[in-house]
Image (cartoon, rainbow, N blue to C red):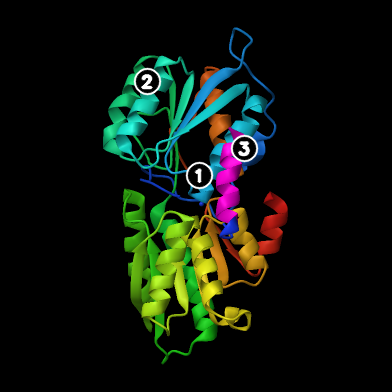
């Protein structure tokens, strides 16, 4: 299984290679520091169920060509045994009916816990309720679902605002107030959190960069879409120098598209900012590529630890707060190397 996910990541990295992803849960503001629960997760010893065997845990995700989601699943498979879990996964390929069938199969196979990244929240809620009624622990990743025991999701307003802030810092250093700043947008309008993030970005850009003008956008989830949409925006708008992306697909793919379009001596004139801060995105920043910053909900590995820790607590009869949020960490040229050294 790990090899399959590794291949996905390697293919993305050949392009040279995060959510999120989802409806935020009520209350709780996003942290600006690395989540403390990641550190506490490292202290957990293996725990098993009363039979002495590992718990069976299934991850039902969609579209693992998205770098950050692939990182979460790969880490869960690798780290599961440390938490007393045998982790398997399925990829629904963006087909909601397929995902529901996969979750049903997890239920029938006797899973102890299921972690779901739902394609269609309304469609998945009933099957999640069925799993809970049968005594299965249900965990939501990034969608703020209701019929779950625990939910780890993103605060779209805080995250999108931070994205605009790091873009504005760069723009204000490189443009005068009387210069028009053309920018392109790689958004994710196919999920509710993407819609809310997109609204926030379009609200905050005129506030923080009054001389900015959005000149193009493209729905972007995968690295391939990030490349194609960035190429289209740049070709149609030759004066565009700034790209904002709501995910790692646009971060990685957009960076490669810019590099393919201009001479390396011009990388400093372009600026791409994204959400996810996967390993490849952080390396882009460190290497002096067009990508100049990314907003981190922490690494996929760190998110995996949070999910596994809370599942472990629930599987062993403990209680957790139902709704939790990713941190919001700004990764730029100033701290990218430090961030990379700490996490990768």
Mark 1 and 3 residues: CB-CB less than 8 Å, in contact?
no
- CA gap between label 2 and label 3 equals 29 Å
Q: Identify the residue position indicated by label 1 in the image.
A: 69
Q: Which mark is residue 3?
A: 3
Q: Is residue 247 visible?
A: no
| Magenta stretch encompasses residue 195 | no
Kind of element beneath mark 2:
helix
Which residue in the structure is indicated by mark 2?
131
Q: Earlier in the sequence, mark 2 or mark 1?
A: 1
Picture coordinates of residue 197, whole percent (x, y): 37, 58
Q: Is residue 185 above or below residue 220?
A: below
In front of the other: label 2 or label 3? 3
**Mark sitting on residue 200:** none
The N terminus appears in which quarter of the rendering? top right
Above or below, 313 relative to 235: above
Instruction: Give the prevailing secondary structure in the magenta stretch.
Output: helix
Q: Residues within 10 Å of mark 1 (few under 14, many from 20)?
A: many
Q: Secondary structure at mark 3?
A: helix
Q: Which residues are magenta?
A: 1-13
Quarter of the rendering containing residue 246: bottom left
Q: CA distance from mark 1 to mark 3?
A: 15 Å
Q: Is residue 8 magenta?
A: yes
Against 284, residue 212 (above or below) is below
Q: Badge 2: how crowded within 10 Å, few (<14), some, or many (20+)?
A: many
Identify the mark nearer the N-term, 1 or 3.
Answer: 3
Q: Position of residue 302 (x, y in %)?
A: 60, 43
Q: Nearer the viewer, mark 2 or mark 1?
A: 1
Q: Earlier in the sequence, mark 2 or mark 3?
A: 3
């Amino acid at each position: 299984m790990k090899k399959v996910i590794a291949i996905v990541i390697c293919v993305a990295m050949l392009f040279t290679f995060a959510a999120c992803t989802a409806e935020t849960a009520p209350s709780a503001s996003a942290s600006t520091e690395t989540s403390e629960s990641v550190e506490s997760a490292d202290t957990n010893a293996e725990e098993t169920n009363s039979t002495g065997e590992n718990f069976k845990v299934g991850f039902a995700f969609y579209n693992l060509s998205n770098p950050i989601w692939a990182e979460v699943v790969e880490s869960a498979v690798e780290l599961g045994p440390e938490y007393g879990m045998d982790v398997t996964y399925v990829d629904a390929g963006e087909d909601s009916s397929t995902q529901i069938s996969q979750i049903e199969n997890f239920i029938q196979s006797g899973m102890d816990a299921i972690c779901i990244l739902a394609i269609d929240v309304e469609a998945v809620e009933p099957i999640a309720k069925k799993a809970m009624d049968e005594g299965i622990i249900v965990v939501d990743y990034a969608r703020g679902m209701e019929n779950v025991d625990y939910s780890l999701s993103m605060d779209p307003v805080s995250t999108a605002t931070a994205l605009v802030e790091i873009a504005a810092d760069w723009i204000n250093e490189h443009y005068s107030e009387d210069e028009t700043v053309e920018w392109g947008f790689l958004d994710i309008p196919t999920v509710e959190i993407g819609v809310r993030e997109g609204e926030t970005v379009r609200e905050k850009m005129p506030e923080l960069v009054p001389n900015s003008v959005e000149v193009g956008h493209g729905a972007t989830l995968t690295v391939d879409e990030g490349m194609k949409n960035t190429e289209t925006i740049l070709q149609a708008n030759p004066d565009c120098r700034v790209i904002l992306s709501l995910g790692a697909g646009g971060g990685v793919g957009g960076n490669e598209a810019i590099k393919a379009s201009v001479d390396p001596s011009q990388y400093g004139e372009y600026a791409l900012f994204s959400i996810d801060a996967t390993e490849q995105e952080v390396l882009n920043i460190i290497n002096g590529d067009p990508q100049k910053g990314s907003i981190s909900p922490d690494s996929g590995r760190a998110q995996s630890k949070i999910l596994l820790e809370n599942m472990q607590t629930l599987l062993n009869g403990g209680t957790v707060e139902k709704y939790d949020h990713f941190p919001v960490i700004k990764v730029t040229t100033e701290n990218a190397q430090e961030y990379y050294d700490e996490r990768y």
